[in-house]
Image: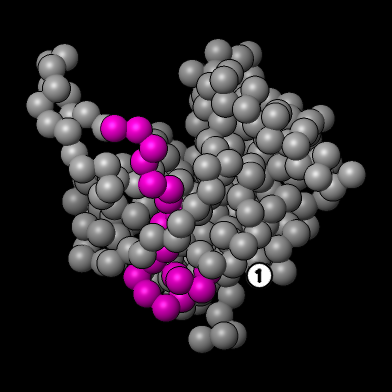
Amino acid sequence: MNDCKAFALIPAAGMGKRMGASINKQYLQLGGRAIVAHTLSVFEQSPLIAGICLVIPADEIPYCREHVVEAGGFRKVMEIVSGGRERQNSVMNGLNFLQGHAAADDVVLIHDGVRPFLAPALLRESIEVARSGDGALVAVPAKDTIKTVRDGYVIDTPDRETLWQAQTPQSFRFDIIHRAHCTAADDNFTGTDDSSLVERLGGRVRIVRGDYRNIKITTPEDLVLAQAFLSAAEEDRA
């Protein structure tokens, strides 16, 4: 089991409409580099990661290859795969590529391309948990009270102690996550995330307690917060 490899599958095929920018959110600048370049760096620099599969809209692949992958010297990027209609389709395209490279017990970490602040310790723990079970889901406890709403009216207030906010990476052995995606495709089922597809097959996905700084940058407010996180990290290193 210790000889098993770990691969990163990074979907970055979203259009980023909520950002309101003229370019897709993964290419917005953060500290002088594209957001997705920061994300790639986390996995490029980890000795635990054998290779990276990056999923990008088909018409952006040449740009991404030249201005992100080659410009950043990301040698672990094995392939830039064309994205699908929905995120689930994009992940499936990435898994189909990895099928030719990953063994059944190898771990695949599925991580949002615009979530650039993943700590190395979380990456390591995710791999360890995924190797020993059905999967690992990085998540943080919900801070706010959550309401269930229908037609504009509150119908329920779930116990906050049971609610966690899912993040990424979501990590699984290759055979488990590939089977879960294939089954979902056969059943024409769309899940809310990759973990939900494994849960649907009876898998028990274990929580890895995450970090509130591990944000997904989807709005202008997120970008301001990300810039603050980056500045703080640079001050700590100084």
Residue 152 lies left or right of residue 3; in this view the side is left
| Quarter of the rendering containing residue 175 | bottom left
| Quarter of the rendering containing residue 238 | top right
Residue 91 lies left or right of residue 176; in this view the side is right
Residue 168 in view, yes or no: yes
| Residue with the mark numbered 1 | 48
Q: Nearer the viewer, residue 77 or 1?
A: 1
Q: Residue at x 19, y 51 (%)?
A: 187
Q: Residues within 10 Å of mark 1 (few under 14, many from 20)?
A: some
Q: Is residue 129 magenta?
A: yes
Looking at the picture, does residue 131 appear above or below residue 69? below
| Quarter of the rendering containing residue 199 | bottom left
Q: Residue at x 84, y 47 (%)?
A: 237
Q: Residue at x 45, y 71 (%)?
A: 129
Looking at the picture, does residue 79 appear above or below residue 221? below
Q: Nearer the viewer, residue 186 or 145?
A: 145
Q: Residue at x 52, y 59 (%)?
A: 109
Q: How many marks?
A: 1
Determine whether the residue tagged by mark 1 lies in a helix, strand or loop.
Answer: loop
Report x, y in % for residue 7: 58, 64
Report x, y in % for residue 59: 60, 30
Q: Is residue 106 magenta?
A: no
Identity of the residue furthest to the right in this view: 238
Q: Three-letter amino acid code at disc 1? A: Leu
Give the magenta range: 127-145
Residue 136 lies left or right of residue 100; in this view the side is left
Residue 182 lies left or right of residue 189; in this view the side is right
